[in-house]
Each structure stands twice: as C-alpha cells, then as structure tokens.
Amino acid sequence: SQELEQSPQSLIVQEGKNLTINCTSSKTLYGLYWYKQKYGEGLIFLMMLQKGGEEKSHEKITAKLDEKKQQSSLHITASQPSHAGIYLCGAVPPGSNYKLTFGKGTLLTVNP
Amino acid sequence: NAGVTQTPKFQVLKTGQSMTLQCAQDMNHEYMSWYRQDPGMGLRLIHYSVGAGITDQGEVPNGYNVSRSTTEDFPLRLLSAAPSQTSVYFCASRRKDSSYEQYFGPGTRLTVT
C-alpha cells in the first residue's frame, strides 16, 4: 500500500519567515493533494498536482511535485498567523481512482 | 450549494450503544468516503462508495457499516460503540475522476465512554 510521510511533524516559526513542508511517497504519485486544517475544523483544499515538475501557487503558498513524482513540497513565503494549522498531503494510490490516502500531517505554529 | 454536511457535530456514547453519523452532499458527486482522524495517526479511510448501491472497505472498517441508497447520502453506522472509536469523523465527496478536488464535511467529534 502507498504510504505518505510528512516532515517535519511540527514546526514553529516567527511571523514573516519562510518555511517548507515535505511529503514523500513510498510509490509513484498519481495525484497529490494538499489540504489545510484549522484546529477543530474540516479540511480546506489548497491545491492538487499531477504532473512531474508541476508547480502551483495560491497567495503565498507554493507547492511542487518533483520530476520523479515521489515527493512534494509546500512552501510558505513570509508566514502569517493565519497560516497556522495542520497541513496534510493526500494521494491517490496507483491502480485506484477512488481511494485517497493521507500523511499524518504537519502542525504549523506561527508566532506573531 | 451546501457542500458536504454532517450531523451531529458532537456526540457522546456509552460503550455498546449504536448510532448513525449522517453525511449528505448536494454536488451530485459519485464518490463519497468516511475518514477518522486520531492524534498522531492522520486521516484513515473507513469506508468509501463509488456510487449509489456500491460500497467498499477502506483501511479501518471494523466496527462500522455503511450503505449508499442515494447519490446524496452516505451514513456511517456504529454497531456497538467502543472507546477505541473515540475520534473525529470526516465525510468527503468528489467527482469520480481523481483529478478533481475532494470536499470535506466539518466533522463529527465522537466520544465513547
């Protein structure tokens, strides 16, 4: 089965600093989703990557899928307290068009 | 559109009790799924459905039943609640094509004493 490992597990940064969260798959990725979750709330879709080398941005958040399609990174530029939360990567396993498996998440704290 | 709705938001059960968590979506999505989220474990797939009348097991199906009689609804039934089922439960839906976004409900926080 496909496993997604996120690093770091948690991260504390000062407001204004840049940061990167990584998501590494045990198998080739055929679709990688990034979600954000605020404590006690549901998941908010950030972006989806499908092609090797693909890069997408939304406001100050940029996600990239490497050429080999086994790792994705999420980069936040000039972090703000509003960026705080849990970031989860999810992927569609090879051979399945339906099931979405997730990493364990990265808890981001942004100190003002 | 209301998106994906879940009821109740909070629930406390005693060991051995049964209950149904409700999930509905109004986007005509073929695919619906149930996840549980536990500290340090991330999101784990319980059951999923690719259309009305079709369901299948996910990663952690034991102790849970599902049915999909309509496209809109996908209830999750706990047959005999156990403390190990204390968790936050999320329902999700999306179009059948995996290139589309998966939408999540707000979650149900369940405590089993």
Image: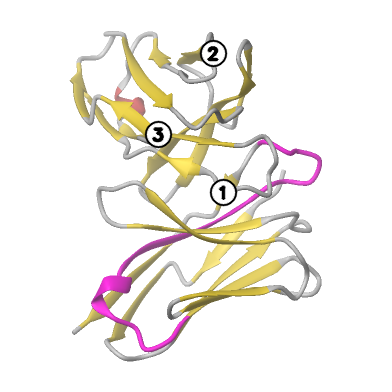
Give the Cα distance between marks 1 and 2: 21 Å
In the rendered image, residue A56, in percent from the top left (x then y), is placed at: 60, 73
Query: What amino acid type should be assigned to the residue bearing mark 2?
Result: Arg
Q: Looking at the image, how many numbered discs can be counted on the residues?
A: 3
Q: What residue appears at the point 51 percent right and 39 percent down from the top-left corner?
A: B44
- In the displayed structure, B87 sits above or below B98; it is above
In the rendered image, residue A51, in percent from the top left (x then y), is placed at: 76, 66
Query: What amino acid type should be assigned to the residue bearing mark 1?
Result: Glu
User: In the figure, residue A107 lies in which quadrant?
Assistant: bottom left
Residue A23 seen in render? yes
Q: What residue appears at the point 24 percent right and 76 percent down from the top-left corner?
A: A81
**Is residue A78 within the magenta segment?**
yes
Magenta highlight range: A76-98
Mark nearer the N terminus (1 vs 2): 2
Q: Residues within 10 Å of mark 1 (few under 14, many from 20)?
A: some
- In the displayed structure, A2 sits above or below A110; it is above
Mark nearer the N terminus (1 vs 3): 3
User: In the figure, residue A84 lies in which quadrant?
Assistant: bottom left
What label does residue B68 carry, if any? 2
Give the Cα distance between marks 3 and 2: 15 Å
| 1 and 3 marks on the same chain | yes
Q: Badge 1 is on which residue? A: B101
Question: Of discs 3 and 2, which sits in the foreground?
Answer: 3
Q: Badge 3 is on which residue? A: B4
